[in-house]
Image (cartoon, helix red, strand yellow):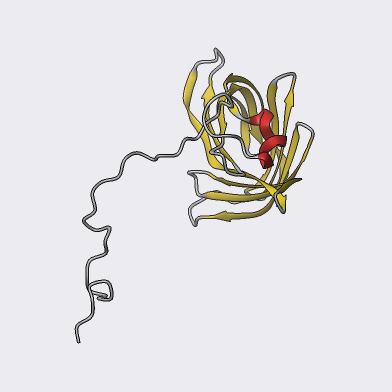
Amino acid sequence: MGASSDDNPLAPPPWLNAPPVEAYPFEESHDLRVGPKLHPALDGLLPYIGVWRGRGRGGFPTIEDFDFAQEIRISHDGRPFLHYESRAWILDEQSRPVRPAGREVGWWRPVLDGDRATDELEALLTTPTGVMELHLGRRKGTQVEFVTDAVVRTSTAKEVTAGHRLFGIVEGALLYAQDMAAVGQPLSPHLSARLIRVAG
């Protein structure tokens, strides 16, 4: 008795010769005037949604201080999390771009109690330098504070062991300060910046 093609483990999977698909069909937006409806769980994080651009200062006990520019894009697709993307570049004394600097992608997730968002947050952030961080945090008004719960590194990544980040919306601008523990140094100031909303 022969098995049907659906039961034949040697038969090619149905997607193997299927026609191509169109572009990703679901919209993501950093602009609340267009795109999907904001999930109610994100109401408390609404002030962060947008594209932000500005300047900052960086440093660490093991390196010289430096000036940088940065762009952060925070968007949503109608589900109860925010997509976070950051890219920065080093500036010289005349504010000219020198070279690309840090990049991060990840998600900010409000902790839900049933369908209702609490003030607790989770953030998952990944860098191209091989560091992945899980942050636990809390929102208080328009201020968000994160502390690392876990850091995972590839075998070739710099030794980063902990972090602390404080974000706030102040007079319409996005301000943040980031501390880091790395390469044998305790938690120390690393980055701070002020970014202006340029879209959203």
Quadrant in the picture for the C terminus: top right
Residue 192 at least partly seen: no
Q: Considering depth in this image, is 1 or 29 the residue closer to the camera?
A: 1
Residue nearest the observer in this picture, 111 or 55:
111
Residue drawn at x 61%, y 35% as measured from the top left: 38
Residue found at the far bottom of this picture? 1
Q: Is residue 145 above or below residue 150?
A: above
Q: Is residue 160 above or below residue 90?
A: below
Instruction: Tell me if residue 73 can be seen.
Output: yes
Q: Residue furthest top?
A: 94
Image position, residue 54 (x, y; %):
60, 21
Q: Is residue 8 above or below residue 187?
A: below
Q: Nearer the viewer, residue 198 or 14?
A: 14
x and y percent of residue 86 in the render? 55, 33
Residue at figure coordinates x 53%, y 18% from the top left: 92
User: Which quadrant of the rendered structure holds the N terminus?
Assistant: bottom left
Coordinates of residue 16 in the picture (x, y in percent): 24, 58
Picture quarter containing residue 2?
Answer: bottom left
Q: Looking at this view, is 83 or 118 the one in front?
A: 118
